[in-house]
Image: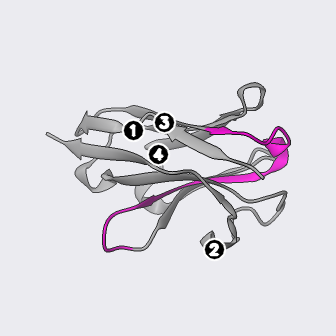
Amino acid sequence: QAQLMESGGGSVHTGGSLRLSCVISDYSFSRWCMGWFRQVPGKEREGVARLDGSDGSVSYAEPVKGRFTISKDNAKNTVYLHLKAVRPDDTAMYYCAAGGVWHPFCHTRPVSDFGYWGQGTQVTVGD
């Protein structure tokens, strides 16, 4: 069973940058659908970005397009989320999740289908 561990969260000024990392214990993850999600108290968890390991395609939620980048390093079993030009409304707990080999449906599967989740890492944006 895959285990995920996020790191890299913290406090950052508005307009700043941050890189989140997610290490996956399962060495077969290279073709998996991976995602980053975020949640603030009282709101539903929302998708931020996804990466289809089968073809490398990526997708982003509208609020983060052009500012966030999802990437991976198969050799390190790690998925990254690069945040730049952050805003106060990016403040949230960020979660990494793994689905499975879902190509070509990685970008449309519902959040509830992701079976493996990390514990989350907090990102706080302020002045």
Q: Which residue is mark 3?
A: 7
Residue 27 counted in the magenta span: yes
Can you tell which mark lies on residue 66? 4
Q: Nearer the viewer, mark 4 or mark 3?
A: 3
Q: Residue at x 73, y 40 (%)?
A: 25
In the current view of this chain or complex, which residue is farthest to the left? 127
Type of residue at label 4?
A: Gly
Instruction: Please state the extent of the stretch shown in magenta in the rendering.
Output: 23-43
Q: Kindly state the secondary structure of the residue where label 4 is placed.
A: loop
- Mark 4 to mark 1: distance in Å? 20 Å
- Mark 2 to mark 4: distance in Å? 26 Å
Type of residue at label 3?
A: Ser
Can you tell which mark lies on residue 9? 1
Residue 8 counted in the magenta span: no
Q: Is residue 92 above or below residue 18?
A: below
Type of residue at label 1?
A: Gly
| Left or right of residue 55, residue 120 in this image | left
Q: Which residue is mark 2?
A: 112
Type of residue at label 2?
A: Ser
Q: Residue at x 39, y 38 (%)?
A: 9
Q: Residue at x 83, y 62 (%)?
A: 104
Q: Kindly state the secondary structure of the residue where label 3 is placed.
A: strand
- Mark 4 to mark 3: distance in Å? 22 Å
Image x and y of residue 98, in percent? 69, 54
Image x and y of residue 14, in percent? 22, 40
Q: Along the polypeptide, which appears first: circle 3 or circle 2?
A: 3
Q: Nearer the viewer, mark 4 or mark 1?
A: 1
